[in-house]
Image (cartoon, rainbow, N blue to C red):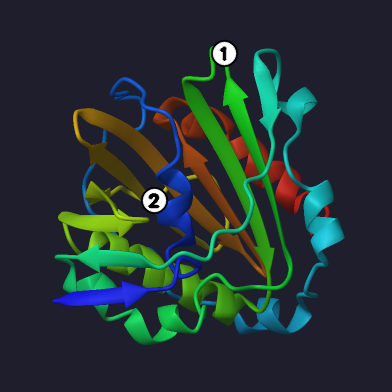
């Protein structure tokens, strides 16, 4: 089945397609077994939480001083509006309706930071979103379920095919109300890139950390601590 979805719906995937190749890193792959994320959303937390502004989210992102030596801030990429074609994944195909309207991760209150490390062969990105707990949970849950619903599929962006292999990982034990994690391998020609991605919802805040598995593991706890320090 061939379904075209807007690039905003696969924002996570299309952003990762531009990451440079890196050697396979097993730091984040030690426990690659499936685990279900908790689904309960405390009602009291939902009622008390105040949605944060983009400026407030920006101040909670990690910066170079938080990360330490060897990290450089990477300029943000311009928005891309090219359609992305997904082949061979019914789970992603089921997102076609929402995806076409930009309904997934299309939150107005958001902030993002991208970094390179060392010789720029490794990258690390952090995204923060704020909305109601239910909206955040539903949106990121749909995306992770779809992306890990197929062990292999293909993404065609601007005419260039990329083979994607996905595997769900156990939820990290770093706190928050809900957690999701996966490892993705992108292959284009003879070039492969391994990316780990972990999302944590804490009340009205959603944190997504993506990049080299070793860097994600190293900075996830720090990112969550700073993002939720003033919550």
Q: Quadrant of residue 189?
A: top left
Furthest residue in direction front, as rendered? 159
> What residue is at 36 percent from the left and 32 percent from the top?
28
Instruction: State whether residue 24 is above or below residue 61.
Output: above
> What residue is at 13 percent from the left and 76 percent from the top?
1
Confirm whether residue 228 shows in the render: yes
Residue tagged by mark 1? 118
Confirm whether residue 29 shows in the render: no
How crowded pointer 2 is (Cα within 10 Å; few <14, some 14-19, many 20+) is rated as many
Q: CA distance from mark 2 to mark 1?
A: 25 Å
Q: Secondary structure at mark 1?
A: loop
Q: Is residue 134 left or right of residue 161?
A: right
Q: Quadrant of residue 206?
A: bottom right
Instruction: State whether residue 71 is above or below residue 197.
Output: above
Indicate the position of residue 79 as horizontal and vertical percent values.
Answer: 61, 58
Indicate the position of residue 19 as horizontal and vertical percent values.
Answer: 45, 35
Given residues 32 and 93, the one toward you in this image is: 93
Residue tagged by mark 2? 181
Label of residue 193 in the image: none
Q: Is residue 206 left or right of residue 110?
A: left
Q: Secondary structure at mark 2?
A: strand
Which image quarter is the C terminus in?
bottom right
Given residues 22 and 6, the one toward you in this image is: 6
């Amino acid at each position: 089945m061939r379904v075209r979805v807007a690039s905003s719906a696969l924002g996570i995937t299309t952003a990762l397609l531009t990451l440079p190749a890196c050697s396979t890193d097993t730091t984040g792959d030690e426990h690659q077994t499936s685990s279900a994320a908790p689904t309960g959303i405390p009602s009291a937390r939902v009622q008390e939480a105040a949605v944060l502004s983009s400026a407030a989210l920006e101040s909670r992102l990690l910066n170079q001083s938080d990360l330490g030596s060897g990290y450089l801030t990477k300029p943000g990429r311009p928005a891309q509006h090219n359609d992305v074609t997904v082949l061979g994944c019914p789970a992603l195909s089921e997102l076609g309706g929402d995806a076409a309207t930009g309904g997934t991760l299309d939150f107005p209150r958001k902030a993002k930071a991208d970094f390179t490390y060392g010789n720029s062969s490794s990258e690390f990105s952090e995204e923060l979103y704020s909305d109601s707990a239910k909206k955040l949970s539903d949106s990121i849950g749909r995306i992770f379920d779809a992306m890990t619903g197929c062990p292999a599929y293909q993404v065609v962006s601007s005419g260039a095919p990329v083979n994607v292999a996905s595997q769900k990982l156990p939820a990290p034990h770093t706190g928050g109300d809900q957690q999701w994690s996966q490892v993705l391998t992108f292959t284009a020609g003879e070039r492969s890139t391994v990316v780990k991605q972990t999302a944590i919802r804490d009340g009205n805040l959603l944190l997504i950390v993506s990049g080299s598995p070793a860097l994600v593991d190293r900075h996830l706890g720090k990112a969550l601590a700073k993002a939720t320090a003033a919550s």
